[in-house]
Image: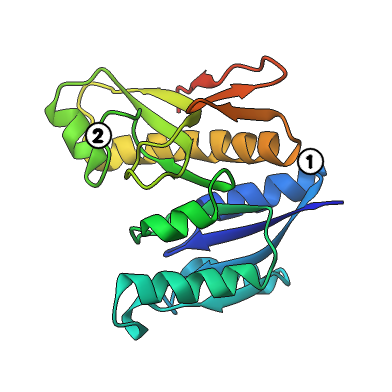
Amino acid sequence: MNKRIVILLSGRGSNMIAVAERCAAEGWPAEVVAVISNKPGAGGLVWAQARGIATAVVAHRDHPSRDAFDAALAAEIDRHQPDLVVLAGFMRILGEAFVQRYAGRLLNIHPSLLPSFGGLHTHERALEAGCKVAGATVHFVTPALDHGPIVLQAVVPVHQGDDAERLAARVLRAEHVIYPRAVRWFVQDRLLLEHEQVRQLDGEPQWLFHEG
């Protein structure tokens, strides 16, 4: 039986598109069954609707607290009975109860080589620190922000003269490679998560050097 994937986003959803297109093109044992946003005008919703994927909006501004928003979001997610929930540019911090509800089946991608530069403004901070490489990390989500068990990382060179915008574009291209790969491993049951470590069961490398 195909695994059911629900994707959460707040914007254009480029990582959502990368995952959905690779899922269809490569014939994964999975289906993107719903795309949910906290923003009614998110561009990713339009893309999903045009392809017959169920969409919904759970606007955080419509709820008096984070807990109330998390509960409404979980109720909408659970209507689709997901095996995996994928955060694809979902710009809300999720509470501990929500994260625990989906423990072991909630993935995120972050535009840095975690555990370095969690949170916002990752590219600016990497440049200010004089980093020679940057990158992106796919990880399981835990209550600690941007510190869950690492599934896959991409290393991206920092070029002389880079600004945050150029570096961000290079990192995003790497994200579009590694996020679908990590999701494919999950739906193919090729990941083992134990003792806060993730192992790819076929021995495929869990890092990638991406020139961009």
Disc 2 or 1, which lies upstream in sequence? Answer: 1
SS label for mark 2: loop
Residue at 45 percent of width and 42 percent of height: 109
Amino acid type at mark 1: Glu
As drawn, 59 above or below 80 = below
Residue 146 lies left or right of residue 82; in this view the side is left
Task: Check whether the beta carbons of the residues at disc 2 and disc 1 lie within 8 A of each other.
Answer: no
Q: Tell me where residue 41 appears, x and y as whole percent.
A: 43, 77
Indicate left or right for 188 with 65 as reference. Answer: right
Q: Check disc 2 and report the residue beneath it.
A: 117
Identify the residue at the far left of this view: 128
The residue under the point 32% across, 81% down is: 61
Query: Could you say where residue 180 lies in the image, as x and y percent from the top left?
Result: 62, 40
Of 192 and 86, the residue lying toward us: 192
What is the CA distance from the residue labelled 2 to the residue labelled 1? 33 Å
In front: label 2 or label 1:
2
Query: Which of the pair 114/16 is nearer the observer?
Result: 114
Callout 2 amino acid = Phe
User: Is disc 1 surrounded by few (<14), some (14 to 19) or many (20+) residues within 10 Å?
Assistant: few
Q: Is residue 61 above or below residue 211?
A: below
Residue wearing tag 1: 26
Residue at 47% over, 26% down: 153
Residue 88 visible = no
**Quadrant of the image for the C terminus?**
top left
**Local crowd at mark 2 within 10 Å, few (<14), some, or many (≥20)?**
some
